[in-house]
Amino acid sequence: MDHKRDIFSSRRAAIFAMAGSAIGLGNIWRFPYMVGEHGGAAFILVYLFATVFLSLPIFLSESIIGRRTHLGPYGAMAKLAPGTPWKHVGLLTICSAMIIISFYSVVGGWSVDYLFKAIRLEFLPERSEQVSSMFGSMISNTWLPILCHTAFLGLTAVIVVLGVRKGIERFSKISMPVLFVLIVAIMCYSLSLPGAGEGVAYLVKPDFSRLDASAVASAMGQSFFSLSLGVGTILTYSSHIRKSENLITSGLGTSLFDLLFAILAGFAVMPAVFAAGIEPGAGPGLIFETLPYIFSSMGVQMPVLSSVIAILFFLTILIAALTSSISMLETGVTYLVEEKGLRRRTAVIILFGFTWALGCLCSLSFGPLSGVKLFGKTIFEFCDSLTSDFLMTLGGLLFTLFVGWKMFRADVRDELTSGGLYPANAKIFKFTYFLIRYVAPVVIGVVFVTNLLM
């Protein structure tokens, strides 16, 4: 089937694309403030454990389904379990991805606005008073956030229209190295600031007294969110991987890139936060409220360097957001192209319209629609909670149950060893299969119930 489908040109291209899907706002926007809220290094240790023993088995489950069929989530489940309701699991994950990209592109739009603010040198010391209130004024504005949301979603659509090789692969090959160079440069600057040592200690010294059930569930949920699991993106990308590629190597490579980037992001943000004497548990506003204030404060002594770092930082956020958003949009596009017979451009236009409209409602929930509540949450908060706390975990649970209990064991082994091409994988197959079949479903179930009761 490889000749009939656009396939990633190499293992490096596949890992870069999947790592791009994983590395996004979950690493830069969510990870630092969640570390701040849950006691630093103790949260990171749980996050590491969850990634290796929970998220990686789910990642491999999606990879097995996608590569086995060379189809998107809906078509893959329908092919492997014909005449059963399993195909609706694929449809559920596609819907989840579309909801995520709707509110995700709003935050991506904020990064567009702040990148232009940094370029216009709006984070200078003489404007420090305005900087602290800048974020609240921007998100409560009616039209500016929608304009930026439209621009971000438009960039995503353009890349996806170009296809897997010409669009997604080419963008990932360029953006991934650039992302790591940028985050390392920002980290070096952050670590050089006076008082940064406290931020480093905060990240490396565990405080297990802060680890309650909520913190553990949040760490596991963050691992889900960060790796883009349970929404069919990894499954979709894996459907473009050659049969000769090593899925375990791809999974480990992607997880390693994601973990490394999240840790680097933590060391890029937290030392600067402590250097400025800011509360580390400042919430989502840490990136868009606290850090611009820090850039402004540091600009008293180093105005040029501080302005350059501000530009690089928000450029990093924008690129990271784009690498994830294209994977989510591609999941929906794959469904419309494969199952409904639409042209790629038509599919992109349709999904752009849907996600743009829902994204506008999410954006307006910070302004004119702030009084509209769904189960006590704004539209933005509801979409975020619905997907990250429930739909992603449910999708991950169903994918692992499908691979562990519905698929033939021999087929799972065949995919993990690439038809016997990688004998070393056969030696760890029993352990990997045990994680997929027993450990991951139980832990995911616990996380799901915990989120339900919280």
Image: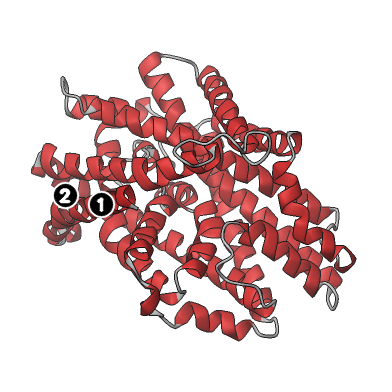
Q: Residues within 10 Å of mark 2 (few under 14, many from 20)?
A: some
Instruction: Give the residue type at disc 1.
Output: Ile
Instruction: Give the residue type at disc 2.
Output: Gly
Q: Tell which residue pokes out farthest to the top in this image.
A: 341
Disc 2 target residue: 420
Q: Is residue 71 visible?
A: no
User: Which of the marked residues, 2 or 1, is nearer the chain's N terminus?
Assistant: 2
Disc 1 target residue: 444
Q: CA distance from mark 2 to mark 1?
A: 30 Å
Residue at 66 percent of width and 85 percent of height: 195
- Residue 349 position by quadrant: top right
- Residue nearest the viewer, comparing 198 with 130: 130
Rendered location of residue 287, percent (x, y):
63, 59
- Residue nearest the viewer, comparing 7 with 66: 66
- Residue 103 position by quadrant: top right
Residue at 43 percent of width and 20 percent of height: 337
Q: Residues within 10 Å of mark 1 (few under 14, many from 20)?
A: many
Rendered location of residue 53, percent (x, y):
26, 62
- SS type, badge 1: helix
Rendered location of residue 452, percent (x, y):
31, 47
Q: Quadrant of the N terminus?
A: top left
Q: Is residue 78 above or below residue 390?
A: above
